[in-house]
C-alpha cells in the first residue's frame, strides 16, 4: 500500500485528510495526503523566500534527478515497480508509461539548453557578464519567482514541461492529479535527492476547494483541464491553460491518401489515444468513406489487453467511467455513420475496462463532432473542400497537412489558432527537443530587460 505524503518545505507531511488511491479495477492502492489551505499559504511563502540554485548547479541537479527518476530506486520503489503501479493506477498502457519516462528523462537533460534557451531572443543575454552588455543589450530574466502547476493525470509525460521552469530558477509547486499522483511524487523526491532543497520544489495535493490557494501564491501558473479551464483562464495573463488539443490531419487530393494510412493510424492510436497531440479529426479532399474504412480496419486489429501488459496499446478505465465515456460518445455520434465503435467501445479484459477505437464519418467539414476529443483512440473523418478552406482546421494544437499546395500551406502557417503545422507524412504526436509544443514555455516564463554597463 502506498502512503504518498505531501512534500512541503520541511519535507514529507502526512495529513489526516487523505484521498484513497485505487487501480482501474477499484482495488485499493494506498492513500494520498491532502493539505489544507493554511499549509499551502505557508508553503508558497517559503518558496518565495528561497533563493534559486546557480544555473550550473540546478541544470546538473535536474539531469541527475531525471536519471534517478527513470532508472533508480526512489522512496523504496524501483523503476519497474513504479511503471507497473502507474499503469494500474491510471489505466495508461505500460509501453506509454515507459515512453513518458523517457520523455521526462530527455527533458531533464535538456530543460535549460534545448528548452529554455531555444526561446531566448537572439538579441538577449543570460547575465550581466556577457560582453554584449558593454554596448547595450537585453537581459533575459524571469517574470517572477514562484511557478505553480495544476497537473493532469492522463499521462506521466505532462510532468516533463515544468522542469523548464525549475531550470529557469523558479521555485515550483505542483498540485498532482488524484488520478495519478505517483509520477510527480517520485520526480520531486528525485529532485530533492539530487540537490534541490525541499523549499525549491514541493508537492501540494489538495482538494478543489483549496486548489486556488496554490495559484494565488504563485507569480505564474500552468493549469491542465478541459474546455472549462481554457475558458476560465483565457484572459488571465498569469495563467497558462492547457486543454484539449483537437489535433487534425488534412489529406488533399494532390496526394494519395493510401500512402499515409500508417501515419494517420499512428496519430490516432499512439500514446493510448489519450494525449492532446493525438488526432481527433481527419479531413479528406474527396470522398472520406474509403479513408475512414481503411483507418477502421487498421484500428480494429489492435488487441484488447490489460494496461500493465507489455504489448498494451489501449487505455483502461474503471468500468463505470468507461461506460460513461461510451454513453457520451454514442449520444454525440447519433445519426453519424459508424465505421468502428458504433455498437460501443467498452471491452472488459480481466478486471479492467478497455476503451476500443472508434471511427465515425461526418457529412460535412463543419460538423460539430469534429471538435470532440476523448481519452482513447476516437477519430472523426470528414470531407474537406477548397471552399471550406482553413475554417474547419482552426483551433488545432497540431495540424498535419499532406499536400503540395504551397499557397494553402502559407495560409495554414499564418492561421494563429493552428499552433503547430507539420507538412507531409509526420504524425501529430511528433515532438523533438527545441521544437515548441504550444509555443515555447520560455515565452511565458521570461521577459527581456534592457541593460548596459561600462
Image (tube, rainbow, N blue to C red):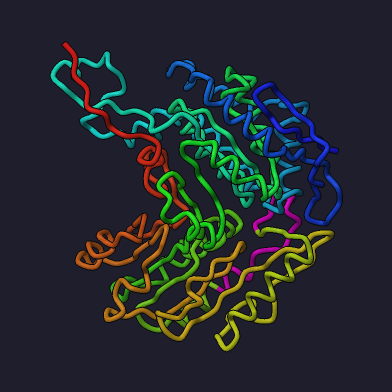
Would residue 307 be counted in the magenta stretch?
Answer: yes
Does residue 295 appear left or right of residue 431 in this picture? Answer: right
96 vs 225, nearest the viewer: 225
Residue positioned most to the bottom: 335
Does residue 440 appear left or right of residue 376 in this picture? Answer: left
Place of residue 63 in the rendered image (x, y in percent of width and height, measured from the top left): 52, 24
Residue positioned most to the top: 454
Residue at image point 35% right, 60% down: 418
Residue at image point 20% right, 18% down: 133
Residue at image point 18% right, 19% down: 452
Would residue 166 be counted in the magenta stretch?
Answer: no
Main structural element of the magenta stretch: helix, strand or loop?
Answer: loop
Residue at image point 35% right, 61% down: 417
Task: Magenta stretch: give its range.
Answer: 296-313
Place of residue 413 in the rendered image (x, y in percent of width and height, measured from the top left): 27, 59
- Whether residue 99 appears in this view of the structure is no
In the rendered image, the vertical position of residue 68 relative to residue 184, given as above or below: above
- Whether residue 231 appears in this view of the structure is yes
In the rendered image, the vertical position of residue 35 relative to residue 22, given as above or below: above
In the rendered image, the vertical position of residue 383 relative to residue 121, given as above or below: below
Place of residue 329 in the rendered image (x, y in percent of width and height, measured from the top left): 63, 75
Amino acid at each position: 500500500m502506498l502512503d504518498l505524503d505531501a512534500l512541503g518545505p520541511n519535507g514529507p507531511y502526512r495529513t489526516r485528510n487523505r484521498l484513497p488511491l485505487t487501480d482501474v479495477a477499484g482495488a485499493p492502492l494506498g492513500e494520498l495526503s491532502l493539505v489544507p489551505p493554511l499549509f499551502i499559504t505557508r508553503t508558497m511563502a517559503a518558496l518565495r523566500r528561497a533563493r534559486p540554485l546557480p544555473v550550473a548547479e540546478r541544470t546538473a541537479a535536474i539531469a541527475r534527478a531525471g536519471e534517478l527518476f527513470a532508472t533508480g530506486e526512489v522512496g523504496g520503489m524501483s523503476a519497474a515497480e513504479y511503471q507497473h503501479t502507474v499503469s494500474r493506477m491510471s489505466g495508461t498502457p505500460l509501453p506509454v508509461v515507459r515512453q513518458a519516462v523517457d520523455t521526462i528523462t530527455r527533458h531533464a537533460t535538456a530543460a535549460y539548453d534545448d528548452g529554455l534557451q531555444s526561446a531566448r531572443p537572439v538579441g538577449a543575454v543570460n547575465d550581466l557578464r556577457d560582453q554584449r552588455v558593454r554596448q547595450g543589450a537585453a537581459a533575459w530574466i524571469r517574470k517572477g519567482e514562484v511557478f505553480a502547476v495544476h497537473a493532469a493525470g492522463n499521462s506521466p509525460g505532462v510532468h516533463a514541461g515544468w522542469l523548464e521552469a525549475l531550470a529557469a530558477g523558479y521555485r515550483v509547486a505542483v498540485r498532482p492529479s488524484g488520478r495519478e499522483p505517483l509520477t510527480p511524487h517520485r520526480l520531486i523526491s528525485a529532485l530533492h535527492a539530487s540537490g534541490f532543497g525541499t523549499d525549491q520544489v514541493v508537492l501540494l495535493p489538495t482538494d478543489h476547494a483549496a486548489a486556488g490557494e496554490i495559484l494565488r501564491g504563485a507569480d505564474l501558473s500552468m493549469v491542465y483541464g478541459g474546455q472549462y479551464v481554457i475558458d476560465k483562464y483565457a484572459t488571465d495573463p498569469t495563467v497558462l491553460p492547457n486543454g484539449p488539443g483537437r489535433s487534425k490531419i488534412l489529406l488533399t487530393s494532390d496526394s494519395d491518401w493510401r500512402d499515409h494510412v500508417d501515419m494517420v493510424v499512428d496519430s490516432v492510436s499512439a500514446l493510448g489515444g489519450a494525449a492532446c497531440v493525438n488526432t481527433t479529426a481527419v479531413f479528406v479532399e474527396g470522398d472520406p468513406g474509403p479513408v475512414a474504412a481503411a483507418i477502421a480496419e487498421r484500428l480494429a486489429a489492435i488487441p484488447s489487453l490489460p494496461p500493465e501488459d507489455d504489448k498494451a496499446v489501449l487505455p483502461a478505465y474503471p468500468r463505470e467511467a468507461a461506460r460513461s465515456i461510451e454513453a457520451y460518445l454514442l449520444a454525440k455520434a447519433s445519426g453519424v455513420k459508424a465505421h468502428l465503435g458504433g455498437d460501443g467501445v467498452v471491452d472488459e479484459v480481466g478486471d479492467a475496462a478497455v476503451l476500443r477505437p472508434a471511427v465515425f464519418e461526418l457529412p460535412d467539414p463543419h460538423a460539430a463532432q469534429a471538435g470532440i476529443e476523448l481519452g482513447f483512440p476516437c477519430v472523426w473523418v470528414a470531407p474537406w473542400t477548397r471552399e471550406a478552406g482553413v475554417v474547419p482546421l482552426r483551433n488545432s494544437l497540431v495540424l498535419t497537412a499532406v499536400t503540395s499546395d504551397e499557397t494553402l500551406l502559407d495560409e495554414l502557417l499564418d492561421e494563429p489558432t493552428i499552433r503547430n503545422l507539420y507538412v507531409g507524412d509526420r504524425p501529430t504526436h511528433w515532438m523533438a527537443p527545441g521544437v515548441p509544443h504550444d509555443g515555447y514555455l520560455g515565452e511565458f516564463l521570461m521577459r527581456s530587460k534592457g541593460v548596459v554597463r561600462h
